[in-house]
Image (spheres, helix red, strand yellow):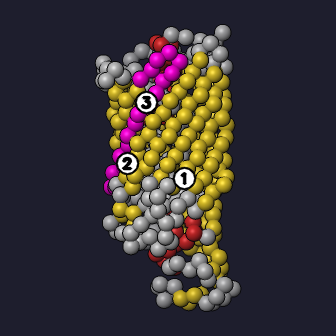
Amino acid sequence: MTNRQLFGIARLMLATGLSVCIAARPASAAEDAKSVYLLGSSASMAGLVPPPGTYLSSLKYYYDGDGSGGVAASRSLRRVGNIQLSADLTIESQAGLELLTVLWVAPGSVLGGNFGLGAILPVGWQNADVDINARAALALPNGTTLQANRRLSLSDETFAAGDPLATAFIGWHAGNWHWKLAGLLNVPVGSYDKDALVSMGFNRWAADISGAVTWLDPKIGFEVSATAGFTFNGENPDTDYKTGTEFHVEFALMQHLSKALAVGVAGYHYQQISDDSGAGAKLGGFKGEVTAIGPNLTYNFVLGTVPVATSVRWLHEFDAKNRLEGNAGFLTVTIPLGGQAPSRGPAMK
């Protein structure tokens, strides 16, 4: 497979991958048990940068998870206070998001590589249900008294736009190796209510820096991709809460069966590496971690003269600490805006 053929598939798959790097996550460690970075968004072809052009991507994301203890307390803290020692708390949460991305890759080269910029807008729905089972009489912040062995249920949902995001990246390639550096910035202007159980926005600035690499052997069609990065969070001025620094690593092992179809597995590991802080961090450091793995499929085709890249994956979480544990589904469709249809995959022997 030539570099031209390789970039053909890369221009769609990489545009797909970059489109979902940050979004409103239903739950993790950090403030409100929520993380800015969307885990599982980087998978196949993560290290490739597409050729010059403009790309449009649509990601549909669904998450369903549950948790107990500190995860539930973090969501309901401003409504019921820190009552973990006197009650059993559980939470169930779901989210359905649409992330729209416009990606532009500059003509020519910068520092010997391909440079690009992008913008991301998440819009969607989230809900949460928190159950509180009192082990002793509780006096809640609103004046309500919850007697021992009584149950209180809290529910909330929202449909709104989240924080928009800006991205910049640069990538290089040599033979079967492809790698890139990327930065993302969360702009806190999305829908937010400090007293709600769920909000689409985060009300804090945040930046993510990551590096990705892909090794793809066109002779056998085997691919290994990996991404690692750090999320740095600013303080939420409405709650005086500063989320600690977060680390994430993601991977994909794929077998390209033809120019159009690839199958494999993807996954991630998340770990918060520094404590939450500030006057609003009533639960202390509240560092969390989780791991996930699941099947991944990509399929590329031409609709008329327009090349279309699709990606589907389902990831199951386990070994969660201070965050929800559940299942995440991704469906991404990406097209270039203008230009010739690229080759759709590695030439299989």
Measured as percent of width and height from the top left, residue 153 is found at 60, 75
Image vertical order of residue 295 relative to residue 204, above or below: above
Name the residue carrying label 3. Answer: 180
Q: Which residue is mark 1?
A: 271
Q: Can residue 305 be seen from the camera position used here?
A: no
What separation in Å lies between label 3 and label 1 (alpha carbons)?
22 Å
In contact (CB < 8 Å): disc 2 and disc 1: no
Q: What residue type is disc 2 on?
A: Ala
Answer with mark 2 or mark 1, whichever residue precedes in sequence: 2
> Pointer 3: residues within 10 angstroms few (<14), some, or many (20+)?
many
Which one is closest to the eye, mark 2 or mark 1?
1
> Dot 2 corresponds to which residue?
207
Looking at the image, is mark 2 or mark 3 earlier in the sequence? Answer: 3
Residue at image point 46% right, 27% down? 179
Question: Which contiguous range is marked in magenta?
Answer: 172-189
First in sequence: mark 3 or mark 1? 3
Q: How far across and down, in percent of the image, does residue 117 sit?
A: 34, 33
Q: Is residue 119 magenta?
A: no
